Amino acid sequence: MIARMSTRRRAREIVLQLLYEADLNDWRDAATSRKFIRSRLQGRKVLTDFAAELLDGTMARRDDIDAKLTKLSTNWALHRMPVTDRNVLRLGAYEILYSGTPGQVAISEALTLAKRYGGENSPRFINGVLDRLFKYHSNPESVSS
C-alpha cells in the first residue's frame, strides 16, 4: 500500500477530492490545501508539488476549462453533470491543455478516476469528452464547432 501511495495517481485522487470540495463548498486557502496534500502524500515533495500544480492550475483556469468542456460535452450542461464527473473532466482537461502530461496519459488517468469514483456511465462519457478535447487541442480543425 505504501508504494501505491507514492504514485502520481494518488496525487490525482487527492486533487480530485479538493476539486470536489471546492465545487460544493467555499474554496480552502492555498496554505490549507497544501497542508492537506502534504499530509496525504506523506510529505513527498515531488508528489506534493505535482498535486499542488494540478490543483492550483485547474482552479486558476477553471472558467476557461469549463467553457471548453461545455462546448465539447454534447447534450450535457456542465452544471447538470455529476460533481465527480465534472471535476474529473476539469482535472483531465487541465492536464491535456496546460501540463506536460501527454494527452493519452491524462485521459487514461481520468478514466481510472472515473471508474473508481464515478457512476456506471462515467468512464464512457469522460473518455468521449476528453478525447474530443485532446483531438481539438492537437488539431483544432479536427472537431467541428
Image (cartoon, helix red, strand yellow):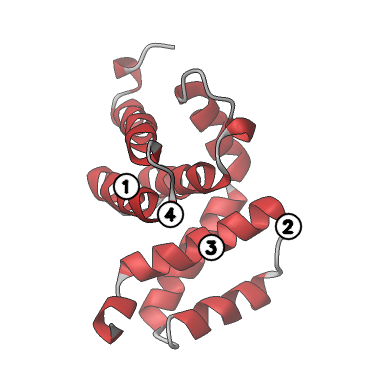
Q: Specify the quadrant that holds the N terminus.
A: bottom left
Q: Are marks 4 and 1 in contact (CB under 8 Å)?
A: no
Residue 9 sits in quarter = bottom left
- Does 58 sit above or below residue 145? below
- Residue at the image position 44 percent from the left and 74 percent from the top: 49
Say whether disc 2 or disc 3 marks the residue closer to the N-terminus: 3
Callout 2: 10 Å neighbours few (<14), some, many (20+)? Answer: few
Say whether disc 4 or disc 2 marks the residue closer to the N-terminus: 2
Q: Quote the CA–CA distance across marks 2 and 3.
A: 12 Å
Query: Seen from this angle, which residue lies furthest right?
Result: 26
- Does 142 sit above or below residue 105? above
Residue 18 sits in quarter = bottom right
Question: Measured from the top left, where is residue 78 in percent x and y?
Answer: 58, 32
In the rendered structure, which amino acid carries the disc numbered 1? Answer: Leu
Question: Helix or strand or loop: what does disc 1 sit on?
Answer: helix
In the rendered structure, which amino acid carries the disc numbered 3? Answer: Gln
Question: Helix or strand or loop: what does disc 4 sit on?
Answer: helix
Say whether disc 2 or disc 1 marks the residue closer to the N-terminus: 2
Q: Are marks 2 and 1 in contact (CB under 8 Å)?
A: no
In the rendered structure, which amino acid carries the disc numbered 4? Answer: Tyr
Question: Helix or strand or loop: what does disc 2 sit on?
Answer: loop
In the rendered structure, which amino acid carries the disc numbered 2? Answer: Asn
Q: Which mark is residue 117?
A: 4
Q: Quote the CA–CA distance across marks 2 and 1.
A: 25 Å
Question: Measured from the top left, where is residue 134 in percent x and y?
Answer: 32, 34
Say whether disc 4 or disc 1 marks the residue closer to the N-terminus: 1
The residue wearing badge 1 is: 111
The residue wearing badge 2 is: 25
Say whether disc 4 or disc 3 marks the residue closer to the N-terminus: 3
Q: Nearer the viewer, mark 4 or mark 2?
A: 4
Q: Nearer the viewer, residue 94 or 70?
A: 70
